[in-house]
Image: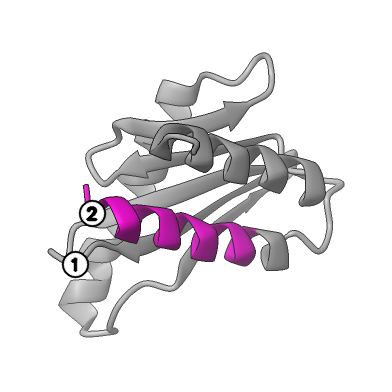
C-alpha cells in the first residue's frame, strides 16, 4: 500500500501528464509543500509559497466581501497561468493545489478538478 505522500505525488504526476501542466504542488495555506511534481527549473518552495500567498490574499478579500468559499483562482499571464484551487480538511484548514500551466496548454481545468477530488480523498483518509 503506497504512503500518503506517494499517493499525492502520483496524483500530481498524473495531472502533469494528462493536463500538460508544468508543475503541480499541494501545500498548506502557510506555503509549506506537502507533495509536488515539478519539471526542472521550477522551484517547488517558491511555487508553493506564491500559490498560498495568492490564495490567502483572495481569501481575505472573499471574507470582507462575504462571497463564500473560494472555488478557484487563476492568474493568466503572457507565458502561462497559475491555477489555485483549495480543499478543506474537517477542521476547516485549507490545503492548496497550485498548478503552473504553460500558455500553450488548453483544456486543463477538468484534469485539475479531477486531481483535487483525488487529493481530497487521500487527505480525508489521513486527516492531517
| Residue for point 46% across, 50% down | 97
Q: Secondary structure at mark 2?
A: loop
Q: Is residue 65 left or right of residue 51?
A: left
Q: Is residue 120 left or right of residue 112?
A: left
Could you say which is closer to the camera, residue 56 or residue 112? 112
Could you say which is closer to the camera, residue 85 or residue 13? 13
The CA span between labels 2 and 1 is 8 Å
| Residue for point 75% across, 59% down | 108
Query: Answer yes or no: do the residues labelled 2 and 1 have beta carbons within 8 Å?
Result: yes
Task: State the image coordinates of residue 69 (x, y, percent, origin top left).
Answer: 30, 77
Q: Does any portion of residue 55 appear in the rendered image?
A: no
Q: Main secondary structure of the magenta part?
A: helix
Marking on residue 8? none
Q: Quadrant of residue 59?
A: bottom left
Circle 1 residues within 10 Å: few <14, some 14–19, many ≥20? few
Task: State the image coordinates of residue 11 (x, y, percent, origin top left).
Answer: 60, 46
Q: Which residues are magenta?
A: 112-128
- Position of 62 relative to 100 (above/below): below
Q: Quadrant of residue 79?
A: top right
| Residue position marked by numbered label 2 in the rendering | 127
Q: Point out the residue furthest to the front here.
A: 1
| Residue for point 23% across, 54% down | 127
- Position of 62 relative to 34 (above/below): below
Could you say which is closer to the camera, residue 1 or residue 83? 1
- Position of 10 relative to 57 (above/below): above
Q: Is residue 109 left or right of residue 127?
A: right
Of callouts 2 and 1, the N-terminal one: 1
Give the colour scheme of this rendering.
one colour
| Residue position marked by numbered label 1 in the rendering | 90
Q: Point out the residue furthest to the left here.
A: 91
| Residue for point 17% across, 66% down | 92
Q: Does any portion of residue 121 appear in the rendered image?
A: yes
Amino acid at each position: 500500500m503506497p504512503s500518503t505522500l506517494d499517493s499525492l505525488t502520483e496524483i500530481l504526476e498524473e495531472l502533469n501528464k494528462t493536463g500538460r501542466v508544468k508543475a503541480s504542488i499541494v501545500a498548506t495555506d502557510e506555503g509549506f509543500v506537502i507533495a509536488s511534481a515539478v519539471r526542472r527549473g521550477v522551484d517547488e518552495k517558491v511555487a508553493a509559497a506564491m500559490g498560498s500567498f495568492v490564495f490567502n490574499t483572495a481569501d481575505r478579500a472573499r471574507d470582507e466581501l462575504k462571497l463564500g468559499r473560494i472555488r478557484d483562482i487563476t492568474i493568466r499571464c503572457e507565458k502561462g497561468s497559475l491555477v489555485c484551487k483549495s480543499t478543506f480538511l474537517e477542521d476547516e484548514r485549507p490545503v492548496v493545489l497550485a498548478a503552473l500551466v504553460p500558455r500553450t496548454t488548453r483544456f486543463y481545468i477538468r484534469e485539475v478538478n479531477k486531481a483535487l477530488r483525488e487529493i481530497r480523498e487521500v487527505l480525508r483518509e489521513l486527516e492531517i
